[in-house]
Amino acid sequence: MEHRPDPDELLKNIQSEENKRGRLKIFLGYVAGVGKTYAMLEAAHQRKAQGVDVVVGYIETHKRAETEELVEGLEILPRKQVEYHNVTLTELDVDGVIQRKPQLVLVDEFAHTNAPGSRHPKRYQDVQEILSAGIDVYTTLNIQHLESLNDIVAQVTGVIVRETIPDRVIDEAAEIEVIDLPPDELLVRLQEGKVYVPDQAARAIQKFFRKGNLTALREMSLRRAAERVDDQMRAYMQTRAIQGIWAAGERLLVCISPSPLSERLVRTTRRLADELNAEWIALYVETPQFASMSSEKRDRVAGILQLAEDLGARSYILSAGSSMDAVTQTIIEFAHKNNITKIVTGKPLRPRWQELLRGSLVDMLIHKSGDIDVYVVTSSDKPSFPAEENPLKLHSPIYRYVLSLFLVALATVTGFFIGGRIEQTNLVMLYLLTVVVSAIYLGRGPAILASLAGVLVFDFLFVTPYYTFAVSDTQYIIVFVALFLVGMVISQLTARASEQAEAARQREAETAELYDLSRDLASSANLESILHVFKKHLEQTFSRTIAVLLPEENRMVAYAISDNLKLNDEEMAVADWVYRHAEPAGRHTNTLPAAQLRYLPLKTSKGVMGVLGVGKPNTANTDLTSAQRRLMESFANQGAQAIERALLEEQNRQMVLLQSAEKLQNALLNSISHDLRTPLVAITGALSALDENHKMDEPARNALIENARGEAERLNRLVGNLLNMTRIESGAIKLHREPGDVQDLIGTALEQLGKRAEHHQIKVNVPANFPLISMDFTLMAQVIVNLLENAIKYSPEDSLIEVAASLVDSKARLQIADRGAGIPFEDLSRVFDKFYRVQRPESVSGTGLGLSISKGIVEAHGGQIRALNREGGGTILEVELPLDK
Amino acid sequence: MTAPNQRVLVVDDEAPIRRYLRAALGAQGFAVYESASGEEALQAVLSHRPDIIILDLGLPDIDGIEVTRRLREWSQTPIIILSVREAEQDKIAALDVGADDYLTKPFGTGELLARMRVALRKQLSVANEPVFQSSGLTVDFSRRLVKVEDKEIQLTPTEYDLLKVLVTHAGKVITHHQLLRQVWGDGYDDMHILRVNISNLRGKIEPDPSRPTYIHTEPGVGYRLKV
């Protein structure tokens, strides 16, 4: 089959160039003392000479003079001080490095474990964050720290290395340089004291530095590097789209169990996958028994899956029924769906007879695998396999056993009464019935007990010779065996049926919960209610405290949060990290595990919408089960999509607003051009008339002049209004607050109105000793003028306009009440909108700016303005201003 | 109306406004001089020795407040400020450094002439006439007696002092700051006390306090006793 460059692969290559992630170079040694740090520093100096901005993030010189010399001349970033058990430890300062943003940073000891309380438990995670920030990293590593080689190293050297790093981290390295030194030379260096050996570990180290060990380790590191070269070659060919011997598209699947051997299984698969250059997947099939397993075992499954991921696999958990058949079926289906070519599984550890009795998964897999190869991996040494759950352990509560015995007793009593009248063999039916009933309603154990007891009692009481367990007729043996088998089979079937029913019920419950959530989310109108619904559902389903955080101006804000939950700055920082990296972090994760909550990114195809924080359970439950975790992920997906939808709707609304703002602008232009021109026409007309017609009589001339002056004043007011409007809208309005006398205010407004108010009766009522109100006198006078003008405009001549001041709830209330036509109810709230005018006869002029400006001014004072319909007809315009404290 | 050949200096950078003022004031018998900038105005005051200056606040070089301050260093020539409605703070600043009165653009010729008349009168009369009388309000300084429509009004000492300051500057605007200083003394800056006393004073002398006829409010600036 011809392999063409996969378009996805090419795209990935282009993207990896675009993303500009930093390049990682690893100086790989096979043991301490080969000179990795030295080589790294030399390389750094070379780069620096080429003009690269190099800084030292973390270097351990171990006081070796030659190394220290090399550090000189390089910029050294300060380390981060971490306080732990009253000891100050120094660690790599990740934020410091990212802030400094050099082109290249040196970080020694890649496999180092950080002091507790650091952001990441491991230094390689720090390095990954630095790489994500686009900074190149040089680092050093000894081969024994590599996860997949961990057990081999242990086998070869007898030393178990605790600080390990996942293989995928190495795979991501752009370059690996092997720092090699023949073992003999190394031993000489060791003797000369040139190798750093911590005093307390001297003996162990001595043991480690045997020539045999060193040779083995050296071989491992060289082989590893050689494999890398292969990989790089292939990668090169892929980027250049060179046709060549492309690796066959192998895909491996390793099936794991809670057994500790699974760890070896995983490592073996990784090596196999490496040799085949294959992708690999780790799979755990969860049966209904999983829920009843000890938490230790469940943790082990999670740990093994995590290990597989660390080693570069993708991991999956699927659920299936409890029967071997169902498990096999699930594995095979998954394998077909994922184009798996090889399945790796462990050699069964059970004795052969058990296998014959219960069937063997390996056999079934081989039987059903079709064209998929099945690799059965064994372990050389006898594992300290913890005993399976005690087979004698009662599966059902005691009372069920008692009940089954009671049923047998009942059958026996019945047998005594009717024994004389029916065939003896038919008596067996009574016991069969007992067994069936026990199997269906009481479970397997009670059924087996019932069949045993039934057989014994029947034999003892009803089979000759009576009152002994001896059997004279061999046909009864068949009856006994049949009774026993029926009990087994029925109880097995019932148990499976009920398990399936339970599983179905659980799935149904999950589906129902998801459905409820999606229904409630769909019916939520806005972001706020979506977040509320989301939070509430999560709280109910998982009984945990929940926080939903969304980004706002470069920081995260908790938009919905459980009542008793408070997030401090550190928690917020974790949430922020999750948002920026789109990866989970916090409790029970590898990033910032010290956090109180576990944080999940709310991802959609458009990116990260926000972050979901999940707190400790309300009840004394432990970590989430995998089923719960999956459900939570589904919840998170639903939530993220709903949030995205709400945000899109919000954008849409903004758009509509923008469009209506445009409409408004057009209205403004029309209105202004009309209102500006009208007075100009009157003025120009008057002036030209006065100029041309000298014989105009005195009253006509005066009328003309009076009209022109009135129009000029109107024009002036309009310009003032437009200026005020602009200032309010641009937020440039500045209040000069002073204590102001309301009576004076109204008086000033009336004076400013002048002749415009002369056709109405205006009654002012300000109580004596009315307190002074803090206000901008000039602007508030403008408000009163505008409100009075409005009242004058919309009420008949000679009608009464009442202006009253009162104190209501620590507010000063000013009311301007007219006896005009009033405002249609639906327009009451809109009269303060810009350019809004209630549809009125032509005679009423004005831009509709006055009330809008008044609203702006009153609100700038922290007050409120509203329009009410007056009892008995007319309108009340009401202003409320806060009183001074 | 005024003594013939009184000299007026018009300082405004807008030529149309200068033209309008030249025409309007010339018709009233004033000799009109014009300046288009602050520097020019300072020179013109020296060379033409005007009897009154009409000064726009928004000038291209030095602003009107600064022109007023510099003029007041050596000249007591009355100054009337022209400004727009939005510049209360500038008006107050100009009045506080010694301008005599202000007018908000746009203004009528009648208004301007009335202001000029008041400003010029200060120069003419020594204001030490013992009795002030204007449209129903009588203040007898020698006897500290206040009457409205021949009815005697009892005022507190503060209210009397307040009225006295307003009356001695009748027709002219007095800023809040000036009033406070002249009635309560230097360093007093309590708007509250001023508002309350004005309100009380109005309650006693105004026929309808919500439409005052004597004490007129200049919004944001101060008060003026109408004559």
Image (spheres, coloured by chain):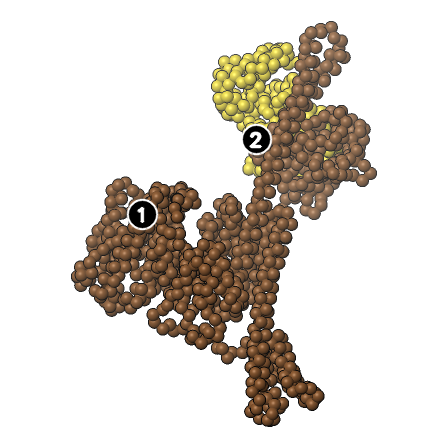
- Tags 1 and 2 on a common chain: no
Judge whether A360 appears above or below A244 on screen. Answer: below
Q: Nearer the viewer, mark 1 or mark 2?
A: 1
Could you tell me which secondary element the residue under label 2 belongs to? Answer: helix
Could you tell me which secondary element the residue under label 1 belongs to? Answer: helix
Q: Chain of mark 1?
A: A
Residue toward you, A368 or B75: A368
For label 1, the crowd category at 10 Å Cα-Cα, with few meaning under 14, some 14 to 19 and many 20 or more, is few
Residue at image position (73%, 6%) is A695
- Say what amino acid the circle numbered 1 marks: Met
- Say what amino acid the circle numbered 2 marks: Gln
Left or right of A870, for residue A356: left
Q: Chain of mark 2?
A: B
- Residue A267, picture quadrant: bottom left
How much space separates mark 1 and mark 2, taking CA atoms? 78 Å
- Image colour for chain A is brown
Please provide percent x and percent y for residue A792.
75, 30
Residue at image position (33%, 63%) is A150
Please provide percent x and percent y for residue A821.
79, 33
Left or right of A617, for residue A61: left
Residue toward you, B123 or B49: B49
- Image colour for chain B is yellow
Figure label count: 2
Residue toward you, A156 or A649: A156
- Residue B188, picture quadrant: top right
Residue at image position (24%, 68%) is A207
Left or right of A759, for residue A424: left
Judge whether A103 appears above or below A399 on screen. Answer: above
Residue tagged by mark 1? A233
Residue at image position (55%, 91%) is A470
Residue tagged by mark 2? B89
Q: Is residue A202 visible?
A: no
